[in-house]
Each structure stands twice: as structure tokens, then as C-alpha cells.
Amino acid sequence: ETGVTQSPTHLIKTRGQQVTLRCSSQSGHNTVSWYQQALGQGPQFIFQYYREEENGRGNFPPRFSGLQFPNYSSELNVNALELDDSALYLCASSLDRGGRSEKLFFGSGTQLSVL
Amino acid sequence: QQQVKQSPQSLIVQKGGISIINCAYENTAFDYFPWYQQFPGKGPALLIAIRPDVSEKKEGRFTISFNKSAKQFSLHIMDSQPGDSATYFCAALHYDKVIFGPGTSLSVIP
């Protein structure tokens, strides 16, 4: 059973640029959630994808968008990067049972720095 | 109403002591309360979880106490070890979204 893998591990961008982060789900999981974790804070829910469709969104602007592919891997795209976007971006996969994903399995994250 | 509050922000405990982290919530629609453990450079990992119809759940040295009427729950780590030094997050499930508290940094000193 493979775990959740994220790439790249670290990324440096400048303000205004666009970035794509990638996530491979744990084998057998059908749901992917993305979280933003600022330094010293808890993870904040960005959005969730279930069977290639967005299945819930947190309080993030539309410049944060995502995709889920048929193999359940996922991408997070952020346009027009701002300095406050600097954070650890976490992907979590889970098995959705009847509309609920109780157990999240996290990757190690992508550390994004916006200069 | 979507918030989960957590205290203390940081905690220092002697090896062998009991670590206690407290959380509170407002939204009675929350129906599943997990705790996650995060080491530096890693993502959070599920530690233990409880449903609101249970007042206590114990797994090894880790115990969750749940007070539904007070809308509070806590994590107790018995016989704390230096390897338990990490950041702990309480969380709550709202529909299909897990909402995290701000975290507690635990240091267990020899």
C-alpha cells in the first residue's frame, strides 16, 4: 500500500506568478482534500475532490483551483500568487463512505515561498 | 461556529508525566472528533478519534475525554515520552470537511 506523495517538496515563486502542486493519493482512496497550513497554525481547508468533481470548498478565493484525475491523483493551482500564499500545502487522501471521509491520510506537503 | 478552539498553545511536560490538551467547539453538527499528531517536516497523522455518543476512548497511552453538554473534549497522554514531542491538533468533522484547531506544541523533557 503506497502512501500519499506530494511534489515538489519545496518551491519558491515571485508575487504574481502561477504555481501547480501535485498529489498522488493512497492506493484505494477516492477522495482528495487540500489544506493550507501557515507557520504555527492549523491546516485550513481549501477544497475537496471526489470522483473528479469539487465536493466542498473553504474560504479561499477563486484563484485557488484544483483538479482530480481518473486515477484519483490531484493538482492544486494557484494563480496571481500573493505574499500571504506562503505556506505548507498539504494533500490528504481518504476513502469516502456514504458522503463522509473520516480518516485523512496526509502527505508531507509542499512548502511554498512567495517572494 | 465553524471554529475549533484549542489550548494551551504550547506545553512542556516531564518524561513520565501526563500531557493534557483541551479543545472546544460551538457547532453541534460536528459528529466526529479526531486528533492528529504532526512532526516537523511531516504531514499530520491520525492519532485517535471519538464520536459524541461516547464519553471516553482509550488507545494505549492516549485517551480522549468527551463532554457533549459542554461541547469540550480533551486529549490525555499518559506516561509522556520524548518521542511524543510534536504538534497536536484537535479537529471536528462537519459534513465532509475536517476543521482543525490551531495546534498545541508539546515538548517532553527527560
Image (tube, coloured by chain):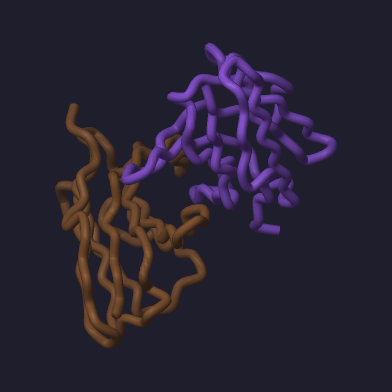
Position of B7 with respect to A7 (left or right) is: right
Q: Residue visible at 32% across and 51% down?
A: A91
Residue B8 lies in quadrant: top right
Is residue A22 positioned above or below B25 on the image?
below
Is residue B96 positioned above or below B75 on the image?
below
Q: Nearer the viewer, residue B74 or A31?
A: B74
Is there any visible trace of residue A98 in the rendered image?
Answer: no
Residue at the outermost right position: B69
Residue A16 lies in quadrant: bottom left
Which quadrant, please, contains the N terminus of chain B? bottom right
Q: Which chain is purple?
A: B
The x and y percentages for residue B44 are 41, 41
Is there any visible trace of residue B28 in the rendered image?
Answer: yes
Q: Nearer the viewer, residue B85 or A18?
A: B85
Q: Which chain is brown?
A: A
Q: Residue visible at 19% across and 47% down?
A: A24
The x and y percentages for residue B90 are 58, 40
